């Protein structure tokens, strides 16, 4: 949610048979707008993070960081399986009219032979700060700089999130945060 009546979601998640098999996209759209008082829902058709077991939850892919800006994952390695799906997602996001901040995903991380769902989009807002998952990766510093520039009134705090990934989540996934008022 951007705080101005716009919600961002993944079609793959909300339309998955294991979640809302009795509802179609139009029905879900109407219900969400009614429940949350939304003007618009942005349904992303592309993008995924390998190792994510949530059917592409939006908090692993793209997030509002303020009412006008979406921070989103990209992959800079053309040989990585994420490259094309995240490029397609980026093209979708460009059409929304929102400002965009690119979050390059870290190099692949593995645990017991399984690729983990490492993403910088799984951050958590707390009182004038943003807690961001870090992975002991060269992109940690790049992410901190980009988010500091996009959110100058917030302190960016990086937390080693590698152990969270073993349980198929990261910082935002481990929190049940509820916002009241400004972040």
Image (cartoon, rainbow, N blue to C red):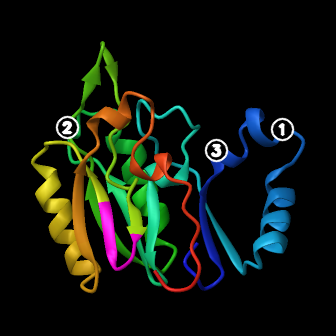
Above/below status of 165 relative to 34:
above
SS type, badge 3 = helix
Specify whether 72 is left or right of 78.
right
Q: What stretch is highlighted in magenta?
A: 126-131
Most frequent secondary structure within the magenta stretch: strand
> Where's the N terminus, which quadrant?
bottom right
Residue name at image x 45 percent, y 49 percent: 60
SS type, badge 1 = loop
Earlier residue among tags 2 and 3? 3
Instruction: Give the distance between the C-alpha atoms of the residues marked 3 and 1, in whole angstroms.
Output: 11 Å
Check disc 2 and report the residue beneath it: 107
**Residue 21 — which label?**
1
Residue name at image x 43 percent, y 62 percent: 91
Check disc 3 and report the residue beneath it: 13
Q: Where is residue 134 in the image (x, y as percent from the top left)?
A: 23, 49
Specify whether 180 is left or right of 83.
right
């Amino acid at each position: 949610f951007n705080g101005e009546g716009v919600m961002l979601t993944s079609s793959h998640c909300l339309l998955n048979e294991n979640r809302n098999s009795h509802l179609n996209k139009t029905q879900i759209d109407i219900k969400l707008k009614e429940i949350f008082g939304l003007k618009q829902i942005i349904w992303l058709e592309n993008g995924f993070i390998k190792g994510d077991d949530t059917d592409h939850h939006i908090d692993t892919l793209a997030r509002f960081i303020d009412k006008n800006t979406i921070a989103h994952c990209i992959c800079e390695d053309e040989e990585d399986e994420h490259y094309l799906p995240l490029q397609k997602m980026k093209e979708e996001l460009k059409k929304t009219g929102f400002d965009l901040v690119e979050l390059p995903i870290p190099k692949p991380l593995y645990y017991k032979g399984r690729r983990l769902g490492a993403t910088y989009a799984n951050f958590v807002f707390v009182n004038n700060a943003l807690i961001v998952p870090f992975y002991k990766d060269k992109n940690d510093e790049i992410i901190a700089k980009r988010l500091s520039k996009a959110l100058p009134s917030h302190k960016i705090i990086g937390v080693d999130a590698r152990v969270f990934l073993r349980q198929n989540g990261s910082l935002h996934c481990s929190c049940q945060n509820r916002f009241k008022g400004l972040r």
